[in-house]
Image (cartoon, grey):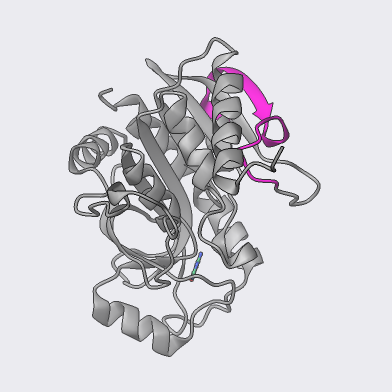
Amino acid sequence: MTAPSDAQAAKQAIETSAARLLATGRRPSIAVLLGSGWGPFADAVQDPLAIPYDELPAFPVLRVGGHSGRVVLGRIGAHEVAVLAGRKHAYETGSADGMKSTVRALAHAGVQVLVQTNAAGSLTHALPPGSTMLISDHINLAQQSPLFGEPGDDRFVSMVDAYDPALREAARAAVAGLGEGRDTIGEGVYAWFMGPQFETPAEIRMFQLLGAQAVGMSTVPETIVARHAGMRVLAVSLLTNMAAGLSAEKLSHAHTLASAAAASQRAVAQLTAVVRGMVP
Ligand code: HPA
């Protein structure tokens, strides 16, 4: 017998993972992928059932601080959700397909909407650290794609309205209904910079000229895979800092995490309202 091709192995991993998720009896229609600072959102899940990524072959092997990632199945309001804590970034391997099989397994399990979250640097003083931003569009500066090598004409996937306009409108309405101090969320273009080093001030000036309002090292590959799989996408950035050269702050991952932690309560309250308010 010949060894299965990579494509066959990936297909099998996707099917096995979807079957494992569905064997719980849960039927998530919305998946929420948590980025830096968004971890407490998992606590908003009612009737939670956690599955470690280790048990799902289409999910990435993560070894950050000795913990594997996990999927938390449960409910937010009337919706069945799958909340993913843990993401593989392109800067870890140089390849944009670290979450490809994961997103496909979710689609295979019947998930129709992918909600992404991330931490990002702000390119505008209109979005100071601590604020949140709905992503309206992105710029794939890295010019990397999880669809490299994909066969078939459906690889030429349209990226117009990749961040679903109706979901964004519903998200704005849900946030507007929150109390004082929590009812504002920005909207703008996210530039994907592959990292892992932070940007130079000259790069940041270029991204501003290109029309971006935020810069970060994630999200875009997953959006591309999700659109290819026919899922609708919503994405929210938590701006943890002014980007390089725009303030006197010294950038570091520790600073990103500390700043995200300080702002996460408000961001998580907004995201909870956004998911609750989604029309399936
Ligand atoms: N640049 C890139 N990624 C980030 C930043 C940033 O300034 N802040 C948080 N993630």
Q: Nearer the viewer, residue 163 or 8?
A: 8
Question: Would residue 70 appear left or right of 140 to someone viewing this image?
Answer: right
Q: In the image, what residue occupies the spot 38% across and 43% down?
A: 226
| Residue 258 rendering spot, x and y as whole percentages | 61, 59
**Residue occupying the point 32% across, 52% down:** 155
Q: In the orientation shown, which residue stands out farthest toward the right?
A: 66
* 167 and 132: which is toward the camera: 167
Q: Residue furthest front?
A: 1
Q: Nearer the viewer, residue 54 or 75?
A: 54
Q: Does residue 112 lie above or below 38 as drawn?
A: above
**Residue 158, x across and y down, in percent:** 22, 52
Residue farthest top in this picture: 25
Above-or-below relation of 85 to 135 = above
| Residue beneath the point at 60% across and 46% down | 5
Q: Quadrant of the N terminus?
A: top right
Q: Quadrant of residue 170?
A: top left
Q: Is residue 261 visible?
A: yes
77 up-or-down from 53: above or below: above
Q: Which residues are magenta?
A: 43-61
Residue 96 percent coordinates (x, y): 51, 60
